[in-house]
Amino acid sequence: MPFEDLGFAKVDHHRAIRHGIPEVIFGKGKTPEQIIAIASRLSDQAHNVLITRVDPDAATRICGALPTEAEHFPLSGAIRIWRDRTVHGKGKLAVVCAGTTDIPVAEEAQITAELMGNEVDAIYDIGVAGIHRLMQNRERLTASRVVVVCAGMEGALPSVVGGLVSCPVIAVPTSVGYGASFHGLAALLGMLNSCASNVIVVNIDNGFGAGYVASLINRM
Amino acid sequence: MPFEDLGFAKVDHHRAIRHGIPEVIFGKGKTPEQIIAIASRLSDQAHNVLITRVDPDAATRICGALPTEAEHFPLSGAIRIWRDRTVHGKGKLAVVCAGTTDIPVAEEAQITAELMGNEVDAIYDIGVAGIHRLMQNRERLTASRVVVVCAGMEGALPSVVGGLVSCPVIAVPTSVGYGASFHGLAALLGMLNSCASNVIVVNIDNGFGAGYVASLINRM
Amino acid sequence: MPFEDLGFAKVDHHRAIRHGIPEVIFGKGKTPEQIIAIASRLSDQAHNVLITRVDPDAATRICGALPTEAEHFPLSGAIRIWRDRTVHGKGKLAVVCAGTTDIPVAEEAQITAELMGNEVDAIYDIGVAGIHRLMQNRERLTASRVVVVCAGMEGALPSVVGGLVSCPVIAVPTSVGYGASFHGLAALLGMLNSCASNVIVVNIDNGFGAGYVASLINRM
Amino acid sequence: MPFEDLGFAKVDHHRAIRHGIPEVIFGKGKTPEQIIAIASRLSDQAHNVLITRVDPDAATRICGALPTEAEHFPLSGAIRIWRDRTVHGKGKLAVVCAGTTDIPVAEEAQITAELMGNEVDAIYDIGVAGIHRLMQNRERLTASRVVVVCAGMEGALPSVVGGLVSCPVIAVPTSVGYGASFHGLAALLGMLNSCASNVIVVNIDNGFGAGYVASLINRM
Amino acid sequence: MPFEDLGFAKVDHHRAIRHGIPEVIFGKGKTPEQIIAIASRLSDQAHNVLITRVDPDAATRICGALPTEAEHFPLSGAIRIWRDRTVHGKGKLAVVCAGTTDIPVAEEAQITAELMGNEVDAIYDIGVAGIHRLMQNRERLTASRVVVVCAGMEGALPSVVGGLVSCPVIAVPTSVGYGASFHGLAALLGMLNSCASNVIVVNIDNGFGAGYVASLINRM
Amino acid sequence: MPFEDLGFAKVDHHRAIRHGIPEVIFGKGKTPEQIIAIASRLSDQAHNVLITRVDPDAATRICGALPTEAEHFPLSGAIRIWRDRTVHGKGKLAVVCAGTTDIPVAEEAQITAELMGNEVDAIYDIGVAGIHRLMQNRERLTASRVVVVCAGMEGALPSVVGGLVSCPVIAVPTSVGYGASFHGLAALLGMLNSCASNVIVVNIDNGFGAGYVASLINRM
Amino acid sequence: MPFEDLGFAKVDHHRAIRHGIPEVIFGKGKTPEQIIAIASRLSDQAHNVLITRVDPDAATRICGALPTEAEHFPLSGAIRIWRDRTVHGKGKLAVVCAGTTDIPVAEEAQITAELMGNEVDAIYDIGVAGIHRLMQNRERLTASRVVVVCAGMEGALPSVVGGLVSCPVIAVPTSVGYGASFHGLAALLGMLNSCASNVIVVNIDNGFGAGYVASLINRM
Amino acid sequence: MPFEDLGFAKVDHHRAIRHGIPEVIFGKGKTPEQIIAIASRLSDQAHNVLITRVDPDAATRICGALPTEAEHFPLSGAIRIWRDRTVHGKGKLAVVCAGTTDIPVAEEAQITAELMGNEVDAIYDIGVAGIHRLMQNRERLTASRVVVVCAGMEGALPSVVGGLVSCPVIAVPTSVGYGASFHGLAALLGMLNSCASNVIVVNIDNGFGAGYVASLINRM
């Protein structure tokens, strides 16, 4: 039987077996009851479970209903059950962010990549206007097999990182900024138009997606 | 000396050595004279050269000024010098497109991937409204290490392909469509919001970028 | 006299007679007092009444002022008085949604279609990234005379469903998503550009409109 | 074998059998050679063929390569082979347009609907600023089972027509206008926000899609 | 001395004398303290004062600090001091709105026009989908020297009214709607593209501006 | 009989009688044959006829088919038949433009207003960055009963003029500009947000509409 | 060592030495804990510190944790430590705003410029619709070496000021307005399209950036 | 007399005297006749004249009508009369561009700055993806008093340059790019959101404005 039907959701117990990856619940827009129901089924059958974008009040209720091993990450709103800690990545994976306010998105990428069996090197607050900070971390960057770069505002960091490394760079625009950042649109457009050929892009604030694809690549 | 300065361009002879990849000239917006000057320098020193987005009249002039081995691809406007045919990819790489009108973009991805040492499996005209066509190609898709998917209009194909394979899917929105496609914006937004976690995105019509990153991944 | 003038609203008692359809009040933006006044007049004269988009606090007050037969649907914010349960539809009508978070919109479509005399087959959580879930419901889809498809994010589901059935597919983009979904714009554009010729579109989150038109078609 | 593979296109000979509808080639973005190759295969096997959006020069070449029965419609750029003239529609279908400049889109809808076996009542140049023209055609509108309404600029006509009839109204925004019409965006948004509940929308200038769905509905 | 300088504002006592019109304070974005300070100065010197867009809490404080003759209008958030009730308009001025939810904007227009010395005929809830309601009010419309039309959603009403009357029609798009209304953008674009030549447009929700210009015209 | 039906157009012979205004044909998007057919009917029955937005080649053909009294205005592409030169305006009407490149739009407004019986004072090239030029024309502005102001780029001129005069100011954004003018969008938004209360707006480049409404107002 | 690493932020003690300018913390999006940690380090080493965009509750906590000399500015949400009051500017610097509601942005510019050693002449509430107010301040404007102009709504003030002075004018669009101001977009586009050649632009509401660059220029 | 009135233009002979700067004609949208007429008047009275954005055919005609000293720059479409070569700048001014295709915009900035009396250091093709090229030019950048940076695509270069220098950086987004560059919008938004505090922005492709303001600053 490929999935279990809860009415409001079809819970797929195949995926973990099929892909060897954690079960994931996108929390935003679901009621706490729905999240608890889905997470309970998954928690019974899967080794690793990730719930993203849970608001603080709901997080308390949800953690209360899950096994005590569930960790809560308040900055990004993630909840993680991490039982199977097998390393799948063939090398290090870097998660970089431009400023302090981009950390919630970077954290989501980091948590995801760890849960999928990667050693993650997190490098925070190295925006392009202080290029010397970036240059001092150049070796850590070139030592990675994939680099995730989270940046808001003008979103220029992936282009500069892309020029420094020869591996794939996954760019995550964040909604950090104000005015003409238009909630991450400026960063998104900047990253899509990157002059560095090794840059690929995910949705605004999609730390999860970046961590997920980076993990797939690091297994290859 | 890291680069040669032509005044209007700094020609970088390092990159091929550094990355083991072809030299690339983005043709659009450059005069034929500029392209010929840069291509001539590169052609003398690099094994493989790719010029993209050259309009038909300029292509004739440029090919006339390059060694006869230069091939011209009229659909995508690419010119290719392919001397070093070493295979670098560890497996097959698929390039898929949704409709006949998406072929120019798919062709750019295919040419790029071939020039970077990949065996490419091209699968054309398998849009989501005829899901049986897609399903019949399922094995070719799952046999690939990376899949590039080019689609205009609603840009739904990457999500469906993403659900069928477990490898990274590089989605290329194309400017194919009319009215509310807004020159590829509809497809771009669709792909950025893909519900398949293994989908990553490049700029509208950026077949080159997709082929480039797919090649990097296929080497890993 | 075709309508009754309450000053702030002209209440139309003709419509039910003219079209054989329920009276409908769009709740959003009206004060509870206005809704109660209009609903009371309609409730006295019409068999079936539907109030949409009422926020939870107002719903309690409004239900308290209406006959006890009024049902409240908290997910979609609808209130329904369903006295005349005559079946008008000539066959089954399917309401499909891509994910759990699209259910409020699908529920609005379902409630509307039921109130207009249709047997509704609700199929939830069958997004395109898990195409096998969709394929397992293929027979239920082809057994329907009209299909309403609600989807947020990339909004790809109507195109795939459109390719599987030969009847009209009414696509409802939902505001589910984040970042570059731009509150449903990505899904809306995707659906307008569908490569399936039998797809037609209503406004973002307009479950009511989809249920309404689907009911008109199912009577034909 | 469900389709024939031409390399650049997969020609589907199933659809006509499956749906009882004409074969359709969307001409825009295809080379004349591609169109001729696909149309020739289809013309051998299908009764009715429609090619849309062909530019004038290409049309001459394409018509020269097709059987002489092929008709060319210069306003909309359509080419039609109409062999099987069976009537499938259960009643009349109206195609309405707001102004003279909307006629190319209305013509595409009309041609499509005729080819799919409908009697079409075409009513042109009845914009909302001259409401008496519209009112004089009221009976023709109410005598139709489905109404297609094409309008550019503010796109208000579908709402007014929607209030006059009780059947489904398929609204087609056209790119007619200038300045803040933004190539049909103003009309598209207007139609999506119609206050008439029986209005559904297709893409800007998509006369074909409107004629197609109207035909499906008229068969029911 | 043409104006009095409060530091945070330059209060102009000239305008009333110069134009024979009320003093106006746009309340949104000003602190209650700022509004009270400006209104007090104006109230001492001018006959008529209008404060617009005051939120409910601030309104209570502001009214408490003004002469008791100040009236508060909760729907639109306006406060009015109306001492000089001279009639300046040469005829009647109509204020029309499409739906109940457009009343706050229409009310702002009405209050403004009354304060500037006009007899106002308010006609509410006559949207285009119920054209008979509009037609029944045709005589009241043609009896007016200027017509203000407030409408959200598709914003079609000004075009239809514009075709019925020969005087200037001032169209006010409202932010009423959801989804693709984009907070009044759909209505705004529709009105700017009106096919009725006598329609002119003001900003979204700008009932004040419409009432102001209508008053200027009605004096001519 | 209120209108004559040409198939592709319904020619209205009522309007001139009803409103006492010229017959107008919007030329853009109509074929020369269509324009000639409509203009010929109108020219036989109406005193004054205006055709707008005709491209140069079509203009030659159209003028050749009309009575010799037809004047052609190449900058704006207008053609005018002006037989009845009765003055209807009660005073002077000013047409102002910000720069030389705005003249085509201003010319369309001027031609329209003249044809509707107004004495027009044309004041060109008085942009806001040279405020002394504007101030030197202040008396001509205050001597007018209505002012039409055409401006592209930032569209600031109507606000400044609006502060100098107490009559209605009709603002016409023009598509003059480049880059972030977005074909007149910047000017349009600027004018809609004018801080001068007597400013009302028409569509981008809509000189005709501005001249038309200004004429209606000047008759009052 | 060029910077100190707090994990979530790299605190740069070089900048003050390098540029002779204050340390700045952009408060929005940072937690109070993060701001306090960074500000404490900076406060120990730098003469002058500026924290911008702090919400009221956080401001109380942050000020409590800083030396008592820290000043809080509630309108703009800024906190300032101003120890070194050396004058660096070679002349006066003017900060101008169009309306009372633009003051928070102007205040941020003023605070920044003062902290960087400038004498600031603040001129508030001189919008373009009252050009006499502007003209009366003409001498103060021409006496300045740089002018910062903050304006929302149509954003026309920088163009008019730009025509009156010959020095650089730094235009700051503000998010003041409603409807088609689109949160400052209208003002931003207006300023970017200014017909005055001496106008340059910063982000919406970016008073800090304007004050910063104005200070750099005033030192030259 | 402050200006000469040519009817279609008011030629200002004051400006040169007033500001000590060249006379400038923005060529785009003006007819060759208009340009020649204005340029002839200016050429008689002013030392230095600049005409921008002239298309190639018009340039030949215009140069033929001007004194032979007029130079034509085909890349940017500028024509320059440079008689007074006094140096006004107090130091060097750098004009930088990211790629070869940005040169036309950079050339316009360079020509303008030279004409206004500056020594210009032009540094071309130093995009951020090859950060070593940029670093090698670091000394030339820090030796400049103002830096103009032209970049299309993601527009990241000004942020990186802004971090390397402490003087004002004038960022010019160019329309170079394709797809999601949206004709320079991506670069414009990127620059407006720059994390470097010394970056200010002009309109897309506005090389003239950047050169103009840079010259004003370099005189200080």
Image (cartoon, coloured by chain):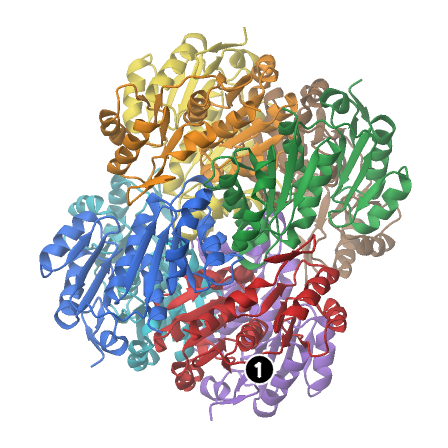
Chain colours: A blue, B red, C cyan, D purple, E yellow, F brown, G orange, H green
With respect to residue B94, does C113 lie above or below?
above
Query: Is G72 in front, or is A163?
Result: A163
Looking at the image, residue B6 sits to the left or right of residue C216; the answer is right
Q: Residue at the top extreme?
A: E1
With respect to residue A6, does H196 lie above or below?
above
Report how many numbered discs are placed on residues in the image. Answer: 1
Q: Residue at x 15, y 61 (%)?
A: A36
Residue E116: percent from the left, percent from the top? Answer: 49, 21
Looking at the image, residue G4 sits to the left or right of residue G205; the answer is left
Badge 1 sits on which subunit? D
Residue G128: percent from the left, percent from the top? Answer: 57, 23
Reading the image, the residue beneath label 1 is D8
Q: Residue at x 25, y 67 (%)?
A: A117
Looking at the image, residue G17 sits to the left or right of residue F43; the answer is left
**Label 1 residue SS:** loop
With respect to residue C30, does C67 lie above or below?
below
Looking at the image, residue D127 sits to the left or right of residue B68; the answer is left
Q: Quadrant of the N terminus of chain E?
A: top right
Residue A78: percent from the left, percent from the top? Answer: 23, 55
Query: Is C100 in front, or is F197?
Result: C100
Kind of residue indicated by mark 1? Phe
Query: Is B203 in front, or is G184?
Result: B203
